[in-house]
Amino acid sequence: MVTIPYWFIRYGLPTAFLLLATATILVLRPVLHDNPAAPAVRQSLPAARVASHRPRVRSTRASAYSVRSGDTLATIAERFGTTVDELLVLNPGIDPHALRVGQPLRVE
């Protein structure tokens, strides 16, 4: 008769169960959440298309904006109810990937 060591029952089986559950979740997560883990799908969407899914609300704020820490053109566009493409047209010559804190931007 084969006896299973106590340490295997106490530590091995729960560890094996957790590994199996984690692997199952990692495999099923993209299917259950519209593929958020697939980077190729995210990279193929243009930034303006993402911003256009929200209703456009014109703000009564000033037409100039000073970039804050953590801002991106997408978050600024969302805040002012515009698109990234419109911000790029209003601000020719800016690098959308290298915004500086305090940098002035036209938003309307």
Image (tube, grey):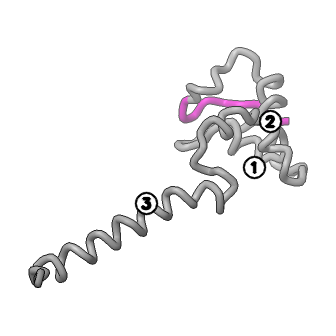
- Residue 25 is marked as none
At x 60%, y 43%, the residue is 38
The quadrant in which the N terminus is found is bottom left
In space, the residues marked 3 and 1 are separated at their CA atoms by: 39 Å
The tag earlier along the polypeptide, 3 or 2, is: 3
**What's the magenta region?**
100-108
Magenta portion: prevailing SS class = loop
Q: Secondary structure at mark 1?
A: helix
- Circle 1: residue type: Arg
**Residue under circle 1?**
79
Is 43 left, or right, of 17 in this rendering? right
- Circle 3: residue type: Ala
Q: Residues within 10 Å of mark 1 (few under 14, many from 20)?
A: some
At x 20%, y 73%, the residue is 12
**Residue under circle 2?**
48
Which corner quadrant of the image does residue 94 belong to?
A: top right
Q: Which is more toward the observer, 69 or 43?
A: 43
Q: Secondary structure at mark 2?
A: helix
Is 1 left, or right, of 40 in this rendering? left
Observer-side mark, 3 or 2, equals 3
Residue 7 rendering spot, x and y as whole percentages: 10, 79
Of all residues, the one furthest to the front in this rendering is 1
Q: Which is more toward the observer, 97 or 49?
A: 49
**Residue under circle 3?**
23
Q: Give yes or no for residue 101 being in the magenta stretch.
A: yes
Q: Give yes or no for residue 72 being in the magenta stretch.
A: no
- Circle 2: residue type: Ala
At x 70%, y 15%, the residue is 93
Residue 77 rendering spot, x and y as whole percentages: 76, 41
Observer-side mark, 3 or 1, equals 3
Is 72 left, or right, of 87 in this rendering? left
